Amino acid sequence: SGRNTRTDFISVNIGTVLQEILVILRTDQKNYKELRSLEQQVLHIRDILKREITDSSNTSTASLTVETVLESFNFLNADSSEDNLSCSETIRIKDERTGSYHKDNICQHDFLTKNGDLGIKAAGTPALTSENVSLDQVLLTHLQLCRRLLQRFTSTGCVVVLQNCILEELSEQTLVLENLALICHEKSGNIKSVEEVIPKSKIGKSILSFWDKCTQTDYVLYLSAEKFLTQLRNCYTQKVAAKYPGQTERVFRTLLHQIVSCCELLLSPNVSEEVVTVFQFFNYVKKYNITQLGTYLIRLAKEVFLPEALQTAQKMKTLKKLKEKLVSEMQPLHQTLQTISILQLDENPKVTQAVTSFLRSALANNIFRAKALAYYTETLQEKDAQLQRAACMALKQLKAVESIEQIASLCHSQRVSVRDAAREALQSFGVKGRLAFDKANMLQHEEGLNQNSTTEITIL
């Protein structure tokens, strides 16, 4: 083969993931303009990469020894479920030009067929490459993100408000793929500076300086998550430790998790094995309008440790700080949203009043409200009655008419507290709430008739 070994491995992955994305998009998702745009961009990239392969020339030869291949796939003996796999894995590659081995990242679960066999040369899988290892790795990472987002989008039980968040993120990924397609087409994969990829006018000097330090000895387009963490430690440990001594690692890992999980839209159980691309990092910076990373980390730290502060005897003091200004400074993290919702059930009326006031103040913040709606609506499906009840109450304060059907589905819960909370939330939505309640009653009645039993229709 004219391609080096690493490119060969990644190119098969690119072809496989790209095919899987197209299969998902070609089912019944044509009603969403975001998905149509994504499909067009994926097809464009496929055409460009095929052309790259056609135009490529023999530049190097490399091979894997049998022992190296066997060592590379020790993970086959482990649990290979989707939730337990990260997007990257390491292989040792022998380059016959130098005789030396080096480590490279690949996506471990892309090498598994449905039967658990190695699918490196699966029939019908095109091997696609830009002929640039760095560019291929970034392209593979973002295609994997698209696939995982689509899998969640089409999964059973994915609520509409969460789907909307996923569609928004997929639009961002489509723009990334468009940028990558341009780089591939111009054969300019050997990017020397971040300004060649991200418009200079959109980059703060301190943010740019941090990324340069992250990638000064590596590719400009991406780096390993561990190296990203190392650079955070080098640059900001002293600043964060001044206010949160001994807690810096938790803050740094929270930032990393937010970046690689698309702000918790995806599960990333082992973020240390991920890679961080220039697009992931700068899209995150843009989303939260970060100009000084050190200042942002202090702000993030406040939220990371907020749940603990709200569970102490001094929680009223902390609650008084939950003003409108704090809403705009929050991600919000899932742990924050859960803690706040549970406090609505507190026996102290001053606590519940403070939480209610905070949630109402969040109505004006689109980022907070969108993420809160997605989280609380999904929480309605939990088995824990306390979480369901708290989620209903939070959605009421957020005026979540978008989640009306999911709330109505709990109106006939066997748990009285959940049932009452759902009905109270629907009542607050006026006519739409009553119509949703009547519809839920009708469905309940029809189910009862089908089971040859009588259902008492309650009145909201």
Image (cartoon, rainbow, N blue to C red):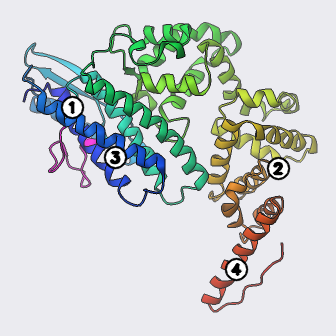
Vertical placement of residue 115 versus 5, above or below: below
Q: What residue does disc 4 label?
A: 442
Instruction: Evaluate if marks 2 and 4 touch, with contact meaning CB atoms under 8 Å apart.
Output: no
Q: Amino acid at mark 4?
A: Met
Asked if residue 405 lies in the magenta stretch, the reply is no
Residue 342 percent across, percent down from the top left: 76, 46
Marking on residue 129: 1
| Residues marked 1 and 4 touching at CB (< 8 Å) | no
Other-residue count near label 2 (Cα within 10 Å), few / some / many at <14 / 14–19 / ≥20: some
Q: Which residues are magenta?
A: 110-129
The quadrant of the picture occupied by the N terminus is: top left
Q: Which mark is residue 80?
A: 3
In three-dimensional space, the C-alpha distance between marks 3 and 2, rounded to whole angstroms, equals 39 Å
Mark 3 and mark 2 lie on one chain; the one further toward the N terminus is 3
Looking at the rendered image, the quarter that the C terminus falls into is bottom right
State which tag comes first along the sequence, 1 or 4. Answer: 1
- Residue at position x 27%, y 48% from top? 19
Place of residue 240 in the rendered image (x, y in percent of width and height, measured from the top left): 64, 13
Element assignment for label 3: loop
Judge left or right: residue 209 versus residue 426: left
